[in-house]
Image (tube, grey):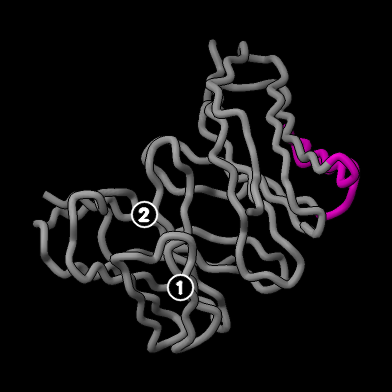
Amino acid sequence: QKEVEQNSGPLSVPEGAIASLNCTYSDRGSQSFFWYRQYSGKSPELIMFIYSNGDKEDGRFTAQLNKASQYVSLLIRDSQPSDSATYLCAVNEGGNYQLIWGAGTKLIIKP
Amino acid sequence: DVKVTQSSRYLVKRTGEKVFLECVQDMDHENMFWYRQDPGLGLRLIYFSYDVKMKEKGDIPEGYSVSREKKERFSLILESASTNQTSMYLCAGRDLTSHEQFFGPGTRLTVL
């Protein structure tokens, strides 16, 4: 059974601090990695994707991928209350139609 | 970007009713997916379709069927609704290049 694991949280971070969200996956054949944000009652929306080992930055968000350790993370700098949401990690095997989803980490940014 | 729409945001049905959830996306040659999402369980794949009239079972297909007669439309059917099918239902389209999935707004279904 291929799995993607996330700490369910909630993860509480003060406003302005760095929020660090982590995800591990079981399938070494995985090639594409996604972070989605989901506000309560809304559908998931893509924040970032990463394919290669290392860091990828987009504004206040940085995705980090370590394929050897089967680990992907999302850092949110200068956290804002509007970042409070559930963050879903998803992983795609090469050539497969499906994404394998983690259960999500609930992030709370405290003013 | 793929735009995905779903026919209803909220739906209330009675046990035993046949329920149709409609999903439309505006890109050609896109794969499409139906998920349900329940608290603490994350996204669970019900069915997906990689082409017209093609369908594959996901992780939890029991009690559901799907129809894809046209590329832009993917329907989820609850043959005989039961209370344990009360959930948020999410439809998604997939970009073939990036593998990214784009979600519709969701349908919150309550079965009484």
User: In front: A9, or A75?
Assistant: A9
What residue is drawn where x is 81% and y is 43%?
A: A70
Mark whose residue sits in front, 1 or 2 = 2
Seen as rendered, the residue at the extreme front is A1
Q: Amino acid at mark 2?
A: Gly
Q: Are marks 1 and 2 on the same chain?
A: yes
Which x, y percent locates residue B80? 17, 67
Question: Residue tagged by mark 1?
Answer: B25
Q: Residues within 10 Å of mark 1 (few under 14, many from 20)?
A: many
Instruction: Kindly indicate the quadrant of the structure image that contains residue B28.
Output: bottom right
Residue A20 part of the magenta-drawn span: no
Label 1, secondary structure: give it. strand
Question: Residue tagged by mark 2?
Answer: B106
B49 above or below B33?
below
The N terminus of chain A sits in image quarter: bottom right
Q: Which comes sooner in the sequence, label 1 or label 2?
A: 1
The chain ID associated with circle 1 is B
A72 above or below A91?
above
The chain ID associated with circle 2 is B
Can you tell which mark lies on residue A95? none
Label 2, secondary structure: give it. loop
Where are the magenta residues, as a range?
A51-69
B23 above or below A77?
below
A40 left or right of B28?
Answer: left
